[in-house]
Image (cartoon, rainbow, N blue to C red):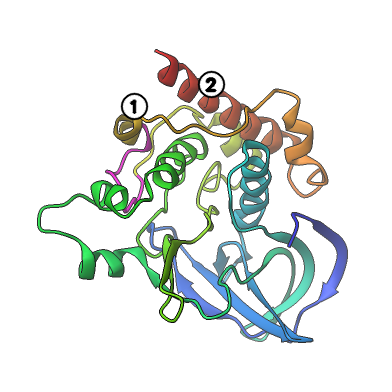
Amino acid sequence: MTTNIIHEKQDLTFLKWSHIRSSSGTAGSFLKSESKLAGVKTYYKLSNYDSEKGIVGHECINEIIVDRLLTILGVEHLSYELVHADIEVEGKKYTTYLCASHNFKKSGESKVAIDDYFRVNGEKGESHYKFCVRQGWKEYVDIMIALDYIILNRDRHGANLEVLRNSRAHTLRIAPLFDHGLSLLYSCITDEDAASFDIMADKPCNNFIGGHSCYENLQLIKDSEYRFPNNLKETDKEIIFSGLEGILSQTFIDKIWAMIFERYKMYENLRNN
């Protein structure tokens, strides 16, 4: 699935939504659903939902922004579509933008959350980072740590990293990067919130690898030889936010871009010093 925005409103009121409580302590719930049409399974998720106020977040838009950022940087990841749709939740109808994605598992693969995989396969006293290095995933986690600093991902918990196994083929791999909604300015609701947000601040994060600071986690990769395959340029702003005008305010667009680009430059400076 490519990173598209479907602006024409779709009727998805047939979807049934399940509640996934936010692991980062935010108010409300994150709702997920799925459908299977013509043999193709599609997964859907909403931004933050409140039973009284409705859909109040913009996490799905963050997924598209980070999706495009990762494409520019040349990093393997799950691709999303942003879909304008009518939905129904708890008997109420809403018009919103939601995320749609397809399965990244190959035929014959099963998945397990990395925290569960670590509990079975980790060695006594082994850190989560060293465990991933021992598994051959150093490049993956080094790039992930750099990305999570740039986007200030607050929710890279153990279920947001998955291990894919094929017992018959005896293969084991780590899933492409996915689930970046609780990042960037997700805690901002109004333009005033966005305008006053400190883009270089280090917020508490729920990380499986490292500690609760995305900035301090950069110390884990200070000597890493792995870098993003491609560079981020100022002209990439147009690519990242194409089609989001009218979905996000210009205040949000400008602030999110400033956050991404300034934190990217900070990461590059730290790497070069």
> For the residue labelled by badge 1, is the local secondary structure a helix, a strand or a loop?
loop
- Residue 64, above or below 110: above
In this orientation, which residue lies closer to the viewer: 23 or 49?
Answer: 23
Question: Can residue 116 be seen?
Answer: yes
Q: Quadrant of the N terminus?
A: bottom right
Q: Main secondary structure of the magenta part?
A: loop
User: In this figure, which residue is indicated by the disc labeled 2?
Assistant: 265
Q: Tell me which residue sits at (61%, 46%) in the image.
A: 66
Q: Residue 240's x, y, as percent?
A: 73, 39
Q: Tell me which residue sits at (30%, 47%) in the image.
A: 133
Q: Residue 214's x, y, as percent?
A: 37, 38
Q: Residue 65's x, y, as percent?
A: 66, 45
Q: Is residue 242 left or right of residue 135?
A: right
User: In this figure, which residue is indicated by the disc labeled 1?
Assistant: 222
Q: Nearer the viewer, mark 1 or mark 2?
A: 1
- Residue 1, above or below 203: below
Q: Is residue 156 left or right of residue 92?
A: left
Residue type beneath disc 2: Lys
The answer to whether residue 214 is magenta is yes
- Residue 178, above or below 141: below
The answer to whether residue 273 is magenta is no
Name of the residue lying farthest toward the top? 273
Q: Tell me which residue sits at (41%, 73%) in the image.
A: 170
Question: Can residue 51 be seen?
Answer: no
> For the residue labelled by badge 2, is the local secondary structure a helix, a strand or a loop?
helix
Q: Residue 206's x, y, as percent?
A: 34, 52
Q: Which residues are magenta?
A: 205-215
Instruction: Answer with the quarter of the image where residue 237 lies.
Output: top right
Which sits earlier in the primary sequence, circle 1 or circle 2?
Answer: 1
Q: Label 2 crowding class (10 Å Cα cut-off): few <14, some 14-19, many 20+?
A: some
